[in-house]
């Protein structure tokens, strides 16, 4: 007979998965903090060991993000709105950042750092919501002969995207989030991407950095005592698969619909998601 408490949490995880998928597809990130928070609360309620509980919540969140973001990335890549050189720069530096963040996360509680990070996220969210000027959808400039010039492949853009990718990967693996909460504002303000471009590149980067962070959490958890039941290292695959199941479906649907949303509205909604997620992190 199935324990009613376990069944209730499975239903909760399916609902959380839908939220993860929608935010990954629509906003390129923002749900990882919510996922990690809910996992911590649920694991605590089930009476699991405090020694491995937080790390397992982080690792499981990264596992979910890897699957849902990968699903959304396929949609974005198929539409040809990804700048390959920019994404490669983000990915290479993001992998380095994710590896460093995963190792740091496994060795430190990071309580103070998490709260400082949450305050920064709140400030960025307020800036976004108040209507910080962003790109209007045009991706090219015009030279003195009137011909279009692609500014996305410039050395400066590639260099800056690498920095953004490293910071995003570091935050992703350390906090158990997708990194979109860093990448989307960075792409809007620093790289001058449109909202759709920022979301698309962030989603693809999330799939890569979250995977690296997840593998690091698995490695660091192998052989540890007091691991949660049904876990491989610091990844609880029962909770992870339940969340990912509905998350993948929701992410693919959202990725198909995101291009039909006005950039201004998309940015404001993302700001609200960031604010709520940051508050959740402060309360964790």
Image (cartoon, grey):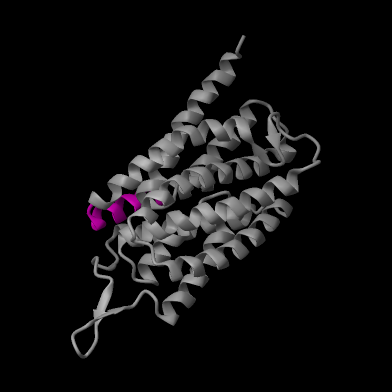
Note whether 250 is above or below 274 in the view shown: above
In the rendered image, residue 55, in percent from the top left (x then y), is placed at 67, 44
In the rendered image, residue 77, in percent from the top left (x then y), is placed at 39, 56
Query: Which residue is located at x 28 percent, y 60 percent?
Result: 130
Query: Which residue is located at x 27 percent, y 68 percent?
Result: 135
**The C terminus is located in which quarter?**
top right
Near-viewer residue (197 or 75): 75
Farthest residue toward the top? Answer: 1
**Magenta stretch: includes residue 267:** yes
Query: Which residue is located at x 46 percent, y 75 percent?
Result: 158
Farthest residue toward the left? Answer: 146
Note whether 134 is above or below 122 in the view shown: below
Near-viewer residue (142 or 266): 142
Note whether 3 is above or below 248 in the view shown: above
Note whether 8 is above or below 226 in the view shown: above
In the rendered image, residue 27, in percent from the top left (x then y), is placed at 37, 51
Query: Which residue is located at x 31 percent, y 49 percent?
Result: 269
* Magenta-highlighted residues: 261-274
**Does residue 242 appear left or right of residue 271 in this picture?**
right
Residue 103, by quadrant, is bottom right
């Amino acid at each position: 007979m199935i324990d009613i408490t376990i069944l209730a949490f499975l239903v909760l995880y399916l609902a959380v998965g839908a939220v993860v998928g929608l935010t990954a597809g629509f906003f390129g990130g923002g749900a990882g903090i919510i996922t990690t928070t809910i996992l911590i609360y649920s694991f605590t309620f089930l009476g699991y060991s405090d020694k491995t509980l937080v790390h397992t919540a982080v690792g499981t969140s990264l596992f979910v993000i890897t699957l849902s973001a990968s699903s959304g990335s396929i949609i974005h890549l198929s539409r040809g709105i990804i700048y390959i050189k920019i994404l490669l720069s983000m990915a290479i530096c993001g992998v380095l950042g994710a590896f460093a963040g995963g190792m740091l996360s496994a060795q430190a509680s990071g309580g103070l750092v998490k709260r400082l990070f949450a305050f920064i996220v709140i400030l960025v969210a307020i800036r976004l919501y108040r209507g910080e000027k962003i790109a209007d959808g045009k991706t090219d400039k015009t030279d003195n002969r009137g011909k279009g010039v692609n500014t996305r492949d410039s050395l400066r853009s590639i260099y800056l995207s690498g920095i953004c990718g490293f910071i995003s990967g570091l935050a992703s693996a350390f906090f158990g989030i997708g990194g979109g909460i860093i990448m989307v504002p960075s792409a809007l303000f620093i790289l001058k991407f449109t909202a759709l471009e920022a979301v698309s590149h962030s989603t693809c980067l999330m799939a890569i950095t979250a995977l690296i962070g997840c593998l690091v959490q698995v490695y660091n958890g192998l052989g540890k005592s007091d691991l949660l039941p049904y876990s491989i290292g610091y990844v609880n695959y029962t909770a992870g698969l339940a969340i990912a199941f509905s998350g993948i479906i929701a992410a693919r649907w959202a990725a198909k619909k995101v291009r039909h949303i006005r950039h201004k509205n998309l940015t404001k909604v993302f700001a609200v998601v960031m604010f709520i997620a940051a508050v959740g992190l402060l309360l964790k």
